[in-house]
Image (cartoon, rainbow, N blue to C red):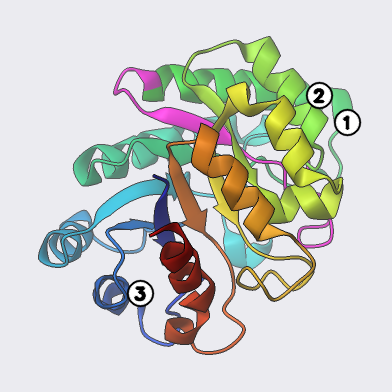
Amino acid sequence: MNKFAVNLSTIFTEVPFMGRFKKARECGFSYVECQFPYEYCIDEIEKELEQNHLKMVLLNLPPGDWQMGDRGLAVDPSRIDEFRQSVGNAIQYAKALKVSKVHCMAGIVSNIEPELARETFISNIRYAATQLGKHSITLLIEPINSFDIPGYFLNNFHLAVEILQEINLPNAKMQFDFYHIQRIHGNSLSLFKKYADVIGHIQIADVPGRHEPGTGEMNYQAIFNHLRGCYQGDIGLEYIPLTKSEDSFGWLTQKRTEED
């Protein structure tokens, strides 16, 4: 059975971050994920996880200065030292919080030559995967659509596949967000079926609004029917609730009822 992990960076934003763990538990979740926990002490997060009987399954590498427009450091040849420091920081959090998967955002390509950006990204991903692998942690890369993040380097599913094949490390996988893939290419389920062997984590949201399943054009019933038979990993709910967070789980209640 698939395990649904509520993303604490996009859901329960009605309350401060440290209050979202309790909200997740109250709504029946056992698994959570988040984007960037680094402004909070490890001990604080660990306490919330323990008190609410939750397991964190995913976090992101530090992305640089988000407020100044950074969306990852991995493509910038002038920031390799900073990127490597971010890997060490992520390992510290992941080890302490027993997180087994870390997503690395690629970054924005502005004045960087495309080939140099690709070479830098591959070198940095290889370094990060090697370092994370020493602690049995999987590194994830994720194609992200250019509507949400204009100028994002890794904005193509096939490019992500090519890079993973070139890196060829067992703990380097793809984070497959059905929302992003659908916005980039369409036919997200077909692409998932074809390349399931390179996928290490799934996230979901509906298109076009990035809200919960059932609010857009995607056929999540067909997606879940397929995943139930072939994917045993975590599914991150990285959507923006259309209304109150607690009211956004009707699709999940219905899904569980249909499976019982």
Q: Earlier in the sequence, mark 2 or mark 3?
A: 3
* Quadrant location, the C terminus: bottom left
Q: Callout 1, which amino acid?
A: Glu
Instruction: Give residue 125's quadrant in the image.
Output: top right
Which mark identifies residue 113?
1
Q: CA distance from mark 2 to mark 1?
A: 5 Å
Kind of residue at badge 2: Leu
- Neighbourhood count class around disc 3 (C-alpha, 10 Å): few under 14, some 14–19, many 20 upward: some
Q: Is residue 93 above or below residue 237?
A: above
Looking at the image, can residue 1 be seen?
yes
The residue depicted at 24 percent of the width and 41 percent of the height is 98
Element under disc 1 = loop
Q: Which residue is mark 2?
A: 116
Instruction: Kindly identify which numbered label has been placed on residue 19.
Output: none
Element class at badge 2 = helix
> Is 58 colored magenta in this rendering?
no
Res 17 label: 3
Which numbered mark, 3 or 1, is in the foreground of this view? Answer: 3
